[in-house]
Image (cartoon, grey):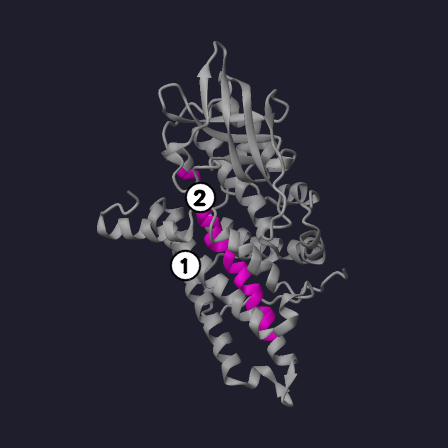
């Protein structure tokens, strides 16, 4: 497949850029340039072949996209949350799978080690994860426990200087290529704790998940634990219970809220350009009311989401954002991005299903993003519980 020329121009209908610092804009431009140079020319081919472009791991590390909010002393970027959001937006504009690789590494692997790990664990793992020398994954979801992780079956027993872990996790991004896995399992008291597993531990395997129609350029797999001996120094000492994994998911959901707007922008930009070039009935299709309606609604929803995300980023920087606020942004962004992709696909007609344009790939990817790290319905119920005080989950 011929490499696609990336002509993307970012929409900013409400001059939201004026709310950003010069540093924010420099960071965004660096990631945007990387995506145009390294991701856009190759991503359709990798997605068509359902292959993970392994070279991006080191590239993302060099670019500073792994753990950008982690302090510098551990190899992170020491940046704020708006910088992190902008990075995720630009990566997902390239492909949701690329953004997933970075989200998992920073929010689901590096964050819990930084927040809940020992100083020894931080020094051992974080610099190698930040640089991209090591890739990490996060094990929470199980074959029979997705939206309800409190009933997980993975468990471990004390065996002296180590514990013995049994169980399985599935739908794990990065798993087949990870050197490190942050895994959540129950101890003998039934309390959930985090453990850091390393590739090569006996009984620990990461079979690849095949047959996906979504996130085809991302590596997905299982984590299988068959009497894995895990040294006690690999247990995260500073957290017990579901609060640990859920706090990681809050960070990752924040990145998704920004990320999927990148996919939406790419589809809008593609549809806008196509509407001016495609001639039907002797004039460009952009001159027809129904096409203008689609484009006008796309830019309206993108603009609303940009403002919502910027405000959420400001609250995150002040440590005032609630998990429920993050849920609202994740759900809103996913919904409008999926709708924008679908409308853009219609505007492109038959061309919309080909790899010549990015729209169908984004559309398929978003079907995963709308489900993972809290399904669309679960995030709706989180908002419902937050405003009524009544739990509709049980």
Q: Could you tell me which quadrant the N terminus lies in?
A: bottom right
Residue in the picture at 50% in, 68% down: 12
Residue 58 percent across, percent down from the top left: 67, 41
Tell me which segment is drawn in magenta: 246-273
Is residue 44 located in the magenta-colored stretch of the structure? no
Which residue bears the numbered disc 1?
332
**Could you tell me what secondary structure mostly forms the magenta stretch?**
helix
The part of the image, by quadrant, that contains residue 247 is top left
Which residue bears the numbered disc 2?
251
Taking depth in this image into account, of 40 and 373 the one nearest to the observer is 373
Q: Is residue 373 left or right of residue 379?
A: right
Q: Determine the secondary structure under disc 1.
A: helix
Q: Could you tell me which quadrant the C terminus lies in?
A: top left
Q: Determine the secondary structure under disc 2.
A: helix
Residue 68 percent across, percent down from the top left: 53, 43
The residue sitting at the left extreme is: 389
Asked whether disc 2 touches disc 1, contact meaning CB atoms under 8 Å apart, the reply is no
Residue 134 percent across, percent down from the top left: 63, 33
């Amino acid at each position: 497949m011929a490499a696609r020329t990336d002509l993307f121009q970012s929409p900013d209908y409400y001059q939201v850029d004026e709310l950003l610092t010069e540093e924010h804009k420099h960071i965004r431009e660096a990631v945007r340039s990387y995506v145009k140079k390294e991701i856009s020319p190759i991503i359709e081919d990798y997605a068509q072949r359902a292959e993970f472009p392994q070279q991006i791991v080191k590239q993302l590390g060099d670019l500073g996209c792994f753990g950008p909010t982690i302090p510098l002393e551990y190899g992170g970027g020491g940046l704020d949350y708006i910088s992190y959001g902008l990075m995720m937006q630009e990566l997902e504009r390239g492909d949701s799978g690329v953004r997933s690789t970075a989200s998992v590494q920073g929010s689901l692997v590096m964050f819990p080690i930084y927040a809940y790990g020992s100083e020894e664990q931080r020094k051992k793992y974080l610099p190698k994860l930040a640089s991209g020398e090591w890739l990490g994954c996060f094990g929470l979801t199980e074959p029979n426990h997705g939206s309800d992780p409190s009933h997980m079956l993975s468990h471990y027993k004390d065996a002296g200087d180590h514990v013995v872990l049994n169980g399985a996790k599935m739908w794990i991004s990065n798993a087949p290529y990870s050197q490190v896995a942050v895994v959540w399992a129950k101890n003998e008291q039934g309390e959930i704790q985090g453990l850091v597993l390393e590739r090569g531990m006996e009984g620990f395997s990461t079979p690849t998940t095949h047959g996906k129609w979504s996130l085809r350029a991302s590596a997905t797999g299982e984590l299988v634990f068959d009497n894995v001996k895990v040294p006690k120094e690999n247990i995260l000492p500073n957290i017990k219970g579901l609060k640990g994994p859920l706090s990681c998911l809050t960070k990752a959901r924040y990145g998704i809220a920004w990320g999927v707007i990148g996919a939406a922008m790419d589809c809008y930009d593609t549809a806008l350009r196509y509407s001016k070039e495609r001639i039907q009935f002797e004039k460009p299709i952009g001159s027809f009311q129904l096409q203008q309606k689609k484009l006008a609604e796309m830019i309206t929803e993108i603009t609303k989401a940009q403002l919502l995300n910027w405000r959420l980023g400001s609250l995150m920087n002040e440590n005032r954002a609630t998990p429920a606020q993050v849920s609202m942004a994740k759900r809103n962004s996913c919904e409008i991005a999926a709708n924008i992709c679908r409308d853009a696909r219609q505007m492109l007609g038959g061309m919309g299903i080909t790899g010549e344009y990015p729209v169908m790939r984004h559309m398929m990817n978003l079907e995963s993003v709308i489900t993972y790290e809290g399904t669309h319905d679960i995030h709706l119920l989180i908002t419902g519980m937050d405003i009524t005080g009544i739990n509709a989950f049980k």
